[in-house]
Amino acid sequence: MKKRILVIGLTERMGGVETFIYNTTKFSNQNKYEYDFLVHGTDHTVFQNEITEFYNGKNHFYFIPSFKKSPIQAIKALFSFYKKNGNKYDFVHLETGAASEVVYVFPFCLFNRFKLISHSHNGGGYSPVINSLFRPIINLSSSIRLACSAEASNWLFGSNNIDKVKIINNGIDTNRFKFNAVARKRIRDQYHINENTFVIGHIGRFSEQKNHKFIIEIFSEIKKVRPNSKLMLIGVGELQPSIKKLVKSLKLNTDVIFCNLKSNTQDYYSTFDVFLMPSLYEGLPVVGIEAQSEGLPCFFSSKISNLIKITDNANILLLTDSAEKWASEIVLSSASIENRKDYAGIVKEKGFSIESTVRELEKTYEA
């Protein structure tokens, strides 16, 4: 008999959690596990079409109001949803970086037969005080605790619960994220970038966490040393307009390319020569794993879990280091085009393939 699992964590924005949910669904065993998705605060979500197609057109999505914006309507919708559907699930899998998200499960997990799996995907957040207030509730109500790293575990569950948390790698599709010279040429031609141009890339939402202002400062220093350089930024977000103003003020308009959202990110990794991610906090970023699978020299901030050092291409720098220091390290980096294809196999061997991750999740469902 199939196990039914309700997943909470998809949003209308493309991000690491959303990608993880889609990947684990796509590579799941349909004969043994079936996922539904509870989405709050929107009437659509990324990967909705792809998941619906995966389930042969059958709807697996439920939408409710945001607790933050419409608490009364959200409570009513949750009571109605769990009254009708709660007893059909073996697990509710809450995939989040904020303990406050437990309001979409608690106290309903006490009244229905399902068990709550709380899965931490971030090493920090915008509201540490609120997170600490909800931490006792998420620990009390969780039957199983998962995290992508020790940092993510400490953030959601507290440092005193580390021995109660299972670390599960953020696996990726290593067959998809493998260097592709044809895609590299196609994308470079599309943006009128010649092969001799040094391309720095970043993929991430324009939010405080991703530290785009520092990315621009680093790139400005790189331009002083390597004038024939371009910066490609993939993503959207609330801070994008202010970053565009910063780029304009530094007269970097022709050198910084705002690509917005892209579904073929694997082609853009192949286009890059370096991947840059000086985040203020992270759990274990999926994009950092994808970039290494594509054989890219990667530069991460020390606020990212040390687990991100999967290959010899991963470099860790301090946020207290100057933009000049970051730039000098990046300029010295180099990667042989001929060897970049080899790294997908290394990432897989290190246990970061999506197949390995899904098997670990399924063990959790069977435990």
Image (cartoon, rainbow, N blue to C red):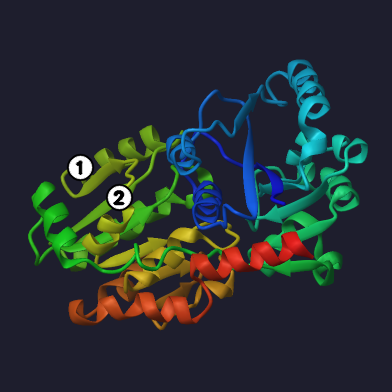
Q: Is mark 2 on a helix, strand or loop?
A: loop
Give the residue at x 51% y 80%.
350
Residue density around tag 1, few if under 14, some if 14–19, many if 20 or more, within 10 Å:
some
Q: On the image, which quarter does residue 181 sit in?
A: bottom left
Choose mark 1 or mark 2, whichever is in front. Answer: 2
Q: Residue 264 carries which label?
A: 2
Asked whether residue 218 appears in the rendered view, the answer is yes
Q: Name the residue under label 1.
A: 253
| Residue 107 against residue 211 in the figure, above or below | above
Relative to 191, is 152 above or below?
A: below
Q: In the rendered structure, find residue 177 and report the number of the disc placed on it.
A: none
59 on left or right of 217 = right
The spot of residue 317 in percent (x, y) is 47, 72
Vertical position of residue 290 compared to residue 114: above or below: below
Dot 2, how many residues are within 10 Å of its Cα: few (below 14), some (14-19), or many (20+)? Answer: few
- The number of numbered discs placed on residues in the rendered structure image is 2
Q: Going by the image, does 159 lie left or right of 60?
A: right
Residue 257: x and y in percent read 23, 46
Identify residue type, mark 2: Asn
Residue appearing at x 63%, y 28% in the figure: 62
Disc 1 marks a residue whose amino acid type is Asn
Does 294 appear above or below 83?
A: below
Q: Position of residue 84 (x, y in %)?
A: 79, 25
Measured in 3D between alpha carbons, the distance from the residue under mark 1 to the one under mark 2, in whole angstroms, is 24 Å
Left or right, residue 62 beside residue 14: right
Q: Residue at x 88, y 38 (%)?
A: 112
Point out residue 3 in the picture as x, y percentages from the top left corner. 71, 50
Seen from this angle, which residue lies furthest front?
Answer: 1
